Every structure is written in structure tokens, then in C-alpha cells.
Image: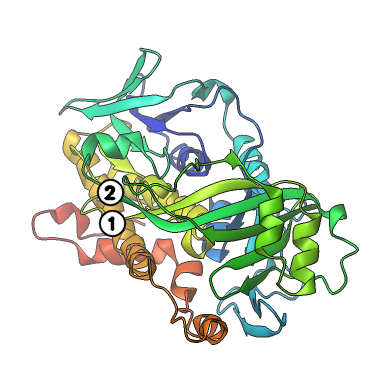
Amino acid sequence: MAQEKLRVIIGGAGIAGLASFLALKKLPNIEVELYEQAPELKEIGASIAISPNGLRTLEKLGALNALDDEVAFRGPSAIPMIYRHWKTNEIILEDHFVDVPDPRHRTARFHRGHLHAALLEHVPRHLIHLNKRIKSASASPEKVQLEFTDGTSAEGDVLIGADGIHSKVRASFVPDHRLYATGKVYMRSTFDASLVENIPDLPLDSSHWWGPTANFFASRLGKNQYTTVGNFDSPVDSNGNPKNIQWNDEGDVELFRKLFQDWNPVVTALVDATPYTRYYPNYAGDPLPTWVFESRVTLVGDAAHTHGGAFAAGGALAIDDAYALYLAFKHVFSSKNGTKGSAKDIETALKLYDRTRRPHAERLLNIVLQGINRKPAATDLDDAAVQRIKNKPDTTWLSEHDVEKAFADVVRQGTVDEPSLTRANL
């Protein structure tokens, strides 16, 4: 008799969606398909950092090519980030690894398109449906459904919303969820590293310069790429959106240069060498009270935790989300003897996932939301910048998080009303 498989549909084929596919395809009684709004799969986007937790998980998912030194840049000093004074270039603070013995797991920086392409190597293209912009999502006791703007639809047993911070899947089940404009607009660029190789005193490691009202970041990336990132404050309209600026709009490189023209010579040389820039207005949102909807739907990545990219944690968070989903479905479905289980089994797996990931993400979201609109005292902006660096929260709990341990802890805790969660099968 043919094996009865659980059909999982994923809305979105970005980093979160591809990682979820790689995770769930490890389970023999699950079949997965992805639905992506883009008309083609190509290298787009700016830079992305993956911290040790995400790199460890990519290794577990079998995406070893994503850890390759050609694709991923790791600083030669094994320092994940160096924080510098905006004017003097003085090093104010350094981050350090606590428990990262394997060099392959040290924080790596990629062109987002290169990481995406590395994950795509593990996904059969016929399982990715392009030109499928999500209009809405729904669920019944028996199935889930995605409706697309082209008039078509897709059905399955489980729906995973991996469609980003402006998620249509999330909006279908939590229509009142609000995103806040943080007041910051980021200007990002990636380009060939040869354009900056002759800059005097250019740091070899990734560096973050903090100024009175703006920050500037620069780093090498894999495949001989380089990135520069700066931000500026932007007024918002009555709907809370930055005025006249949309995500991925073409930026004004002359404005970029003007914003940082009075900074130290390394920064000014970097902005002068930057050939173009694009705008990325920043948003964040409140923590969700649950990531499980109608017992068959959940979220991963920025759709689940709308943290606006804080601490460059989004990619690694999404990858760990995917692995936690795998652990939850493996735990519940490994004993189903080749069947797709019941609706209750699906709900149990999704609740396990929720309890593993949501509190972790909520801790980050609370830090982000507390910082929105927090302005330094005008009396001494330069001293305020230094103090902001020195008082930066330690995020080792985030960058070196152990998702397997977190999942095992949740399973061990169990609940009275769900006795199936009281025994681990790891």
C-alpha cells in the first residue's frame, strides 16, 4: 500500500521558506511544495549575516555548501563584530564568541542572493511554484488553502507562512497585528570588493561605526563582494510609514555620501567608493500571542517575529525556526507508521514548535520595541553614542542559541492536557 503523506505548503521561497523545505524534507512521511511571488529565482537583495546558531543548523540540514569559505566571509580575527567611534575610528567595544569551537560556525556574512542560491541547490525546482503572490490564506478542520492574486489556489494539510515581515498569511489570521515604523531608513549596497581594496586603514573584520544619530556598517562578503550600510531618520506619514520611501527603492548615493561626509576618513572613503544604494525602511511589530492558527497553520522567519532585522539576527532565527519545525514533526509523526496522522497530531506538533520558538523571539522583540523612538539626550550627542555602544546588550543568548536543547526542554516540561508531550523521542 502506498505511503500516505502529510502535504505541507509553504508560502514564500526566501531564506525562511527554503530552510523550512530542507528541514521538513528530512521526514519520510511529509511532502512539501513552495509558492513564491517572484517571477524567477535570481540573486537579489543586500547582505545578510548568519550567526553561529544558524550556521550549526545549516550544517544539520545538510546545506554544507552554504558554509563554504567562497560563499561565506568570516573575519580573520575571529571577532564577530567590532564597534568603532564615528569620528575618531577608535575601537570602543568588541563582540566575542563564547562557545564556538568549530571555525565554520563563526559568524559569516553573505550576499543574500548567494546564500539563497546555496540553499536552492538542495530544492528540486519543480517543487517551487513561481509568480504566486499570496492574496489570502484560510484553514478548515480538514485542510489549509492559499489564494493567489492570479486567481489560482493551493491546498494542503499544513500551511507555513514564510512570506516576510508584511506577511499575507499572518494578516489572514491576525488582521489587527500592527507594524511600527522605527523611524530609521537603511541605505544598503553590495558591490565588488576591488572598489575599496586601496582604502588606507580599511578594517579586515566587519566593523560598525556608531554616531550620535546614525550608524554605519561595512564588511567583506563571500565571493569577493563588499557591503556598506548606513541609516538616517525619516518622518512618517499618518499611517506610520516613512514618507515617499518604499522597500528596495533606488537610493540617492549622493545623499548617502552627504550623510557621512563628516565622519572619519575610513567611512568617508567607503561611502565615496559605494557605487549605488537602495532604501530599506525599517519596521517592527508586537509579539504574537500564538504562532498556531486553526490548528494547521504556523509562521516562520520575519512573518513570525517582526523584529526589523535587529542584531542582524533574522536569517539565523529563520533557519532555527525551520529546524524546530522539523524536530516537532519528527517527535509527533515518527511513530505514525507511514501515515499522515490526525488533525490533533498536526496541532500537537505546531504547539511544540510554538513553545520552542515564540518565547525566544519574544525576548528579542521586547528589546527592539523598547528601543523605538528612544533618543539620546541633546546635551552631549557624542558621549551618548559612546555610551550606547558600551551599554549594548549582550546577545550571546541569541547568536549562540541551541535550538535542539530548547526543544528538548519544552518536551521534558510537558503539559497535563497533552500527555504525548511528556516523553521525548529524540
Quadrant position of residue 257: bottom right
Give, as a three-letter code, the residue at label 2.
Arg
Residue 140 at what x, y percent from top left?
Answer: 17, 27
Q: Are marks 1 and 2 in contact (CB under 8 Å)?
A: yes
Give, as a three-letter code, the residue at label 1.
Asp
- Tell me the residue at 63%/51% (across/down): 188
Asked if residue 102 is positioned above or below residue 94 in the image, the reply reads above
- In this figure, which residue is indicated by the disc labeled 1? 286
Q: Quadrant of the C terminus?
A: bottom left
Q: Secondary structure at mark 1?
A: loop
Is residue 163 visible to us here? yes
Residue 109 at what x, y percent from top left?
Answer: 66, 58
Asked if residue 215 is positioned above or below residue 44 in the image, the reply reads below
Which badge, 1 or 2, is on the more N-terminal residue?
2
- Camera-side mark, 1 or 2: 2
- In this figure, which residue is indicated by the disc labeled 2? 178
Residue 43 at what x, y percent from top left?
Answer: 66, 36
